[in-house]
Amino acid sequence: MRGTGVRARRSGPAPAAMAVRWEGGHSASVLCLAAGSEGPAASGGERGELALWGRDGVPAGRLRLAPAEDDVAALAFSPRRPHRLYAAHGAAVALLDVRALREPVERLRFNEDEINCLALADGGDLLAAADDSGAVKVVDLESEKVVRSLRHANICSSVAFRPRRPQSLVSCGLDMQVMLWNLQKARPLWTTNLQECGTEEDRLQSASQLFNPPLAHSLSVASCGNIFGCGAQDGKVRIFRVTGLKFERELEFKGHSLGVSQVLFMPESYWLLTGGNDGKVLLWDVSNDIGKQQKSPAKLLHKRKGQAAATARKDGKLNKVASNEHARILPKLTIEHGEKVNWITCTEIKGSRRVLVADQSSSISVYPLPES
């Protein structure tokens, strides 16, 4: 077993902890993870492999979806029916019942290319599937019909519904675009190109480093629904605030030395987990940097006063320059995982929060997280 340790910064010393390894669920790389509100966690991997896990880290069920050459690239539990698990398998979505894991209850196929991300609205009635063609298919699960087809110019890597706003969602892709959508409209309400979003120095640096453009890999929406984070290939994490029919860049910081493959806001907080191609998992507390007046993530956020920022508009897009103070944000916790991170999720085990990490191996690493 590889040695993987945890060390803390800013928040004092962390307990000496090694990763607990969950093994026996996969024979190849684990590509994605999901943790339901009840019952087991789930993992999907290469060769169509899917596994369920008990809280003790022992496989509670295994299944190989056919055809085996299609990887299981994304998973999502239903928020209203926690026994329902949706698994993206190639260009199809399999509906599974985790109470008795066997062949899919149903197979849905609305996408034309391999699916990278699944998202469910709060009510569990709408499913969004983002794929390699750049399409996001939004499906009404009751009627099993596509209610909206959204589009990126390149691979759409991530999509997420905004909590308590079932008609609103955000998406990002390898076209470096981050988009805000309302399902009543076919066109995005607001679009930001990450290559144009930043200071003049950032844009000059991006132009001179074409080998490392800010391809957008992952996004996550905080519980309040108005704040979301995006991780990109340039190693930066960008935090945005939705204001009406648009969003503005609230915060930007260098999160990893290589691409940021995963971002995840923890429930009911402004703690953000990020995973990177540099083999690190970082925990950030951005609550002080996105508005000191905010007391609860469930309430509407107010714009931080006195922030040193300049705003300019170009071609209908927002370009906001963050203050120097934002650039000094440091992680609350650093986990030296040691391998490229494919997926992260957060769950509670025996009353304590844990982060589950999937990488290039066939096992899952589980690390403790500090209490808020």
Image: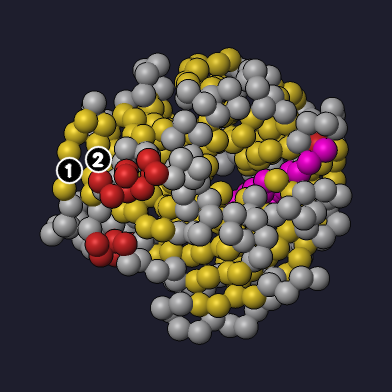
Residue 208 appearing in the image: yes
Looking at the rendered structure, the secondary structure element under dot 2 is strand
Examine the rendered structure and indicate whether residue 138 appears above or below residue 118: above
Q: Callout 1: helix, strand or loop?
A: strand
Q: How is the image coloured?
A: secondary structure
Residue 221 in view here: no
Question: Which residue is at a point 28% across and 57% down the rendered structure image?
Answer: 290
The correct choice, above or below, for 314 with respect to 328 in the image is: above
Tell me: 311 left or right of 188. Answer: left
Check disc 2 and report the residue beneath it: 319
Per the image, is 80 magenta?
Answer: no
Q: Measured from the top left, where is residue 22 in percent x and y?
A: 78, 62
367 or 95, nearer to the observer: 367
Pick the residue in front: 140 or 146.
146
Which mark is on residue 311?
1
Residue nearest the observer in this picture, 287 or 255: 255
Residue for point 68% across, 33% down = 88
User: Which class describes the residues within 10 Å of circle 1: few (<14), some (14-19), or many (20+)?
Assistant: few
Residue 1: horizontal and vertical position, in percent? 81, 71
Horizontal side of 269 relative to 337 (left or right) equals left
Asked whether disc 2 touches disc 1, contact meaning CB atoms under 8 Å apart, the reply is yes
Q: Quadrant of the C terminus?
A: bottom left
Report the span colored magenta: 32-47
Mark 2 surroundings within 10 Å by alpha-carbon count, few (fewer than 14), some (14 through 19), many (20 or more): many
- Check disc 1 and give the amino acid type: Thr
Residue 34 colored in magenta in the image: yes
Q: Position of residue 40 (x, y in %)?
A: 71, 53
Task: Place residue 75 in its image quadrant.
Answer: top right
Residue at the extreme front of the image, as rendered: 208
